[in-house]
Amino acid sequence: MRTIRFIIQKEFLQIFRNKAMLPIIFLLPVIQLVILSNAATYEIQDIRMVAIDKDNSPMSHRLLSKLNGSPYFKLLQVTNNTKVGTEALNNGIADIVLEIPHRMEKNVTSNIPVKLQLSVNAIDGVKAGLASGYMQAIIVEYGKGIIMLNPPSSLSGGVVTQTSNWFNESLDYKTFMVPGILVLLVTMIGTFLTAMNIVREKELGTMEQLNVSPIKKHHFIIGKLFPFLVLGLLELFIGLVVAKLVFNTPFLGSLFIVFLFAILYLMVVLGIGLLISTITETQQQAMFISWFFMVIFILMSGLFTPIESMPVWAQKITLFNPVRYFIEIMRMVMLKGSGFGDVGRHFLILGIYALVINGLAIWQYRKTS
Amino acid sequence: MNRFTAFVKKEFLHILRDPRTLLIMFGMPVAQVILFGFAITNEISNAKIAILDQSKDVVTQKLISKILSTGYFELENYLNSEYEIEQVFREGKVKEVIVFGPNFASDFQNGKANLQVIADATDPNTGTTLINYTNAIVNDFIGQEFAGSARILPIRIETRMWYNPELLGVFYFIPGVITIILMLVSTMLTSISIAREKELGTMEVLLASPMKPAQVILAKVIPYLFLSFFNAIVILLMGRFVFHLPFEGSIVFLLLETLLFIIVALSLGVLISTKVATQQLALMISLFALMLPTILLSGFIFPVENMPIALQVISHFIPAKWFVIIIKSILLKGNDISHLWKETLILVAFVVVFIGASIKNYKVRLE
């Protein structure tokens, strides 16, 4: 026990004496959390639109002004030349080009079907899908208005649909992103620092001294792990305070569950860092490997793109991604108020994970070189 | 000049003698591109839903089977009461709950059938998308059931998706993944180089040598330039043959732009390297400080033009953002220098600033 305490003391001293690292550990995550949480949004506004109006009737004018009046579209130009519209799409002036055919008004009033043509720059598939969805909705709405004006004689059945968005009624992206980005920052700090930790001692030659000392393998691993666990929890706490103060992120569930889970979670990610550290020879190698896993963990965590959208094999891979579980827990507890009963399975999985990873790290660490 | 080539050779040997790092360097980007090219997508399919059917009649059965047959939704379970709605959401099992009101079939004929669509909007994008899908399916269903009656709208929209007709996520994500990998790997590689010499004490030898600062830096960058460029070619080949990206534009132009972007990243690495004393610090800056801003502000996942103005301004200082624009325009639209001169000039400006600052920072004395 005494041995562990000394290692812990040494590690803390090393962390706090490194003045250049302190702002990176404590300040940078907060800055990134505050700034980057604003960046992650799919809310789309002012999609640049060019209209080719071949009808040039009161109806087409009303339709265009209705589109322009919505927050989604910004009408840049109205032309009657198809070429001008295509050109605008080609050189990136417009995102979307709507073509209104000849005699739209005439045909609509005499109930002949009319086809509007919509061309979308679809390089960004998501944006294109949303843009055409909004367009569709506005035009359908407009069409309904026309039906109302001339009610058909035989009004037949249908459905009254009511939609509601639970847990995030205002559809605020920040509410969704802040907990996730906070998890990423805590994870990166923890993994990178521990991954470089042991290997640094190897590279600088101080590892010899530790190896000849009477420290047991598990003492060594625990002593290396503990300071970063404390650091990670502190980091998480600061992040949660910032989330509350700056973003007013709701926190419906229990703080206790989050921190209990965080301890388990940090044991997993720090264990991964230590494992990397024991199997590499230079800091460069350690960083490369941890970076590789970190990019995979981040992009396959369900934070930026939903896990359900991934192919089945990729969804299976995410089962081994600790970040995924912590992000899920954070969202469930903070935004939905989930309790122990709802997240018990996550605890079990990460518990097993922590045992396996740290067992491996202890087993892999060799006192002989 | 002879002295300089000898120095470059030394740097090459350093790299080639560490086969582990080489393997990581080439193996990992390839693995990542393959993984992400196939895995990352925003298209929603097989979203789990729960259904609370208070009527259980012919019409609800028909509508449910229509909803489930589209491929967008997958039924997790039927609920028995409204209480269970909140429960399934809190367990995180389903993304949407559809509630059919009582007497659905008879109300359906009168146009008053009650349908409630509730989405878990903790993820707003998925939430709205699912609601939109459901509405579209229901409208389509009404159209089918009452075909021929005047309920059907007289206006139809025909949508054409240009440049990426199938809305493939791959087209959007692969250029982004290439950019991120080149940016981070190249920056990291050079950022450690000088810091390592400092940390291991070999910096003194370099300082005592008659090499000029610019020569030392250049010699350090050249080997990594080759390696990164080779890396880029491998990734582009995979984009072509594994993911069938269209190569609309000129390949020579694309390679030149790629080379320019690698130089930007390498010179940023050099700048970091001259500033810091330890490899640890160099790595934390080049990876931790750069990773999320590069992913989030480059327009790789989230469109830059939706961000608040302040962030759009910040994004101008992210080199990756400009390269994402360049590579996408060349690959998907076939644009050439006449469209992309502005972005190219900005990248050149980055190089000038980074290199200039590095030379200024490079100290010929140890503290």
Image: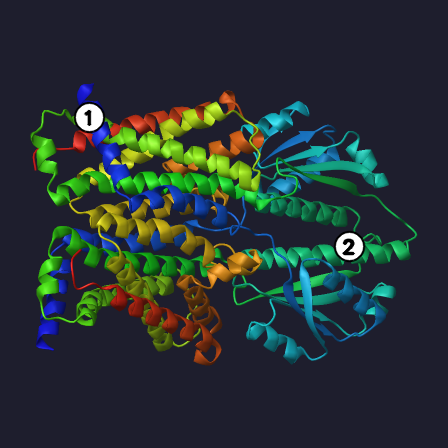
Vertical arrangement, residue A129 with respect to residue B251, above or below:
above
Q: What element carries label 2?
A: helix
Q: Residue A141 carries which label?
A: 2
Q: Which chain carries label 1?
A: A
User: Does residue B93 show up?
Assistant: no
Residue type highlighted by circle 2: Glu
User: Does residue A334 show up?
Assistant: yes
Q: Residue at x 42, y 68 (%)?
A: B327
Instruction: State left or right for residue B346 relative to residue B282.
Output: right
Judged from this view, the residue extending furthest toward the right is: A153
Q: Which of B43 and B271 is in front in this view?
A: B271
Where residue B45 sits, quadrant-wise, is top right
* Residue B328 percent location from the top left of the image: 45, 67
Choose the circle earlier in sequence order: 1 or 2. Answer: 1
Question: Which residue is identified by label 1?
Answer: A6
Dot in front, 1 or 2? 1
Coloration mode:
rainbow
